[in-house]
Amino acid sequence: MKLFPRLALAASLSAAAPLAAQAQQTQVFTADERHYQEGLELFDRGKYGAAQQAFQRYLDLTQRRTGELAPGRTTDAEYYYAVSGLYLFHPDSESRILAFATNNPAHPKAAQAYFELGKFYFDKKDYVKAIDYLQKVGPDNLSDDQRAEAEFKLGYSYFAQKEFDKAKLQFDRNKAGASEYRYASSYYAGYLAYRAGDYAGARKDLAVAEQNDAYKPVVPAVMSQIYYKEGDYDGLITYGTQALQQTPPPQSADEIQLLVGDAYYQKEDFKQAAEYFDKYAAGRKSIDPKVQYKIGYANFKQGDFKGPLAV
């Protein structure tokens, strides 16, 4: 009869042993998780050196516990460790990221690995390398914002390398979305359409870009050229005079003044032509002879005989 309590106690102790081991194992996983989550938070805040240390601690703990790096989250940790090194300009970071993408081709972050390398070289204005890596990005494994950024930066890299047809394909795709890059893509798509003589398409794209504060000052110079090349002098006068009233004034305001002046000149409104020509000429040390002739003629028609009608 007295054996029962002893057996019960032994049974209880036997049951408690696995539970204690399980609790200890849970603590190990919790420590791993803490370092991983800490690494993610530091990475998101741009604290790449501290993030690397946290991910390294996570990888060390995982390897110590299992004897090898277990699949799963450790792969993500390796990715973040490598990308952190890229932003710290570590010399081995590019090879680490490429090794990650090569060793884990089916992993969703393989696409992001090329995306990060493409962004890195884009920011360094190394557009050849940016193109190389951004071309390899699998867009299905990126977020909508990342996909839009990759499209635009690939397009601009082509643009910088004067591969305009390839650039326009990227800009046209990108401008159709709803990302923050649609205005930039609309501007460059519009400029390329203007360059190709598609003035209607250029005006449509530039009108979208002009809605953004970053592009509002730079669009009027190109848009005014389009109206002028189309021979739409009334449209140029309306658009150009409004653009010149912007605060701050648009870039290349003097060139817009010249075009508006010439539009009035073509309409034989020499009084208005002279006003805009004089604004253009103010403070200039040299003026193209053909422009100088028009300025002189417009002033001559106003009874101002001071300037020579030079050709």
Image (tube, rainbow, N blue to C red):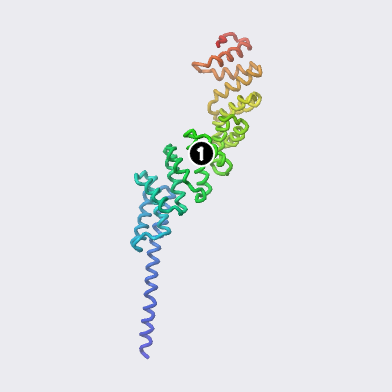
Q: Relative to the observer, which residue lies in front, 49 or 92?
A: 92
Q: Which quadrant is home to the C terminus?
A: top right
**Residue found at x 42% / y 37%:** 126
**Residue found at x 60% / y 22%:** 260
User: Is 274 above or below relative to 75?
Assistant: above
Q: Relative to the observer, which residue lies in front, 162 or 213?
A: 162
Numbered-mark total = 1
- Where residue 144 appears, as percent x and y from the top left, is 53, 48
- Where residue 176 appears, as percent x and y from the top left, is 58, 42
Left or right position of 13 against 311: left
Can residue 47 be seen here? The reply is no
Q: Which quadrant is home to the N terminus?
A: bottom left
User: Is 135 above or below relative to 104?
Assistant: above
User: Is 256 above or below relative to 206?
Assistant: above
Indicate the secondary structure of the residue bearing disc 1: helix
Can residue 197 be seen here? The reply is yes
Q: Place residue 15 in its image quadrant.
A: bottom left
- Where residue 62 appears, as percent x and y from the top left, is 36, 60
**Residue found at x 57% / y 39%:** 172
- Where residue 195 appears, as percent x and y from the top left, is 56, 30
User: Is 134 above or below relative to 32?
Assistant: above
Left or right position of 94 against 221: left
Q: Amino acid at mark 1?
A: Gly
Q: Place residue 185 in its image quadrant.
A: top right
**Residue found at x 44% / y 42%:** 132
Which residue has dot 1 on it? 155
